[in-house]
Amino acid sequence: MPKLYSSKDVTKVLKRAGFSQVSQKGSHIKYRGFYRGKLQTVIVPNHKEIAKGTFNSILTQASMTLEEFKGYF
């Protein structure tokens, strides 16, 4: 089974990649930042474990590969 990341892990990586928190509504936190020359908006659920599909969606929203994510981790 692949490693599941927490919202704290994802938040740490996004901040290192240049994203900043814009707002929060309930348990979902919105981050914005320039990555690869484009303004990206990423929504992260504030959960202990983020599901695999949701994590893949976060990577897509951030235009980031898994290798890039692990590089910031």
Image: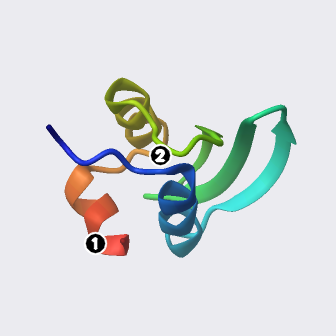
Q: Position of residue 67 (x, y in %)?
A: 20, 59
Q: Give the residue type at disc 1.
A: Gly
Q: Nearer the viewer, mark 2 or mark 1?
A: 1
Classify mark 2: residues with Cα within 10 Å, few (<14), some (14-19) or many (20+).
many
Identify the secondary structure beneath mark 1.
Answer: helix
Q: Position of residue 9 (x, y in %)?
A: 48, 61
Of 62 and 73, nearer the camera is 73
Residue at the spot x=46%, y=37% of the render?
Answer: 50
Image quadrant containing the C terminus:
bottom left
The residue labelled by disc 1 is: 71
Inter-mark Cα distance, 2 to 1: 14 Å
Q: Position of residue 23 (x, y in %)?
A: 85, 46
Above or below, 58 relative to 68: above
Q: Position of residue 13 (x, y in %)?
A: 47, 66
Relative side of 36 to 26, left or right: left
Return the residue found at the far left: 1
Relative side of 25 to 50, left or right: right
The answer to the question of whether label 2 and label 1 lie on touching residues, with beta carbons closer than 8 A, is no
Relative side of 48 to 2, left or right: right
Residue at the spot x=43%, y=28% of the render?
Answer: 54
Q: Give the residue type at disc 2.
A: Ala
Residue at the spot x=27%, y=65% of the render?
Answer: 70
Q: Check residue 62 in the rendering and tell me which mark sits there, or answer none.
A: 2
Mark found first going from the N terminus, 2 or 1: 2
Above or below, 57 relative to 34: above
Residue at the spot x=14%, y=37% of the render?
Answer: 1
The answer to which image quadrant residue 57 occupies is top left
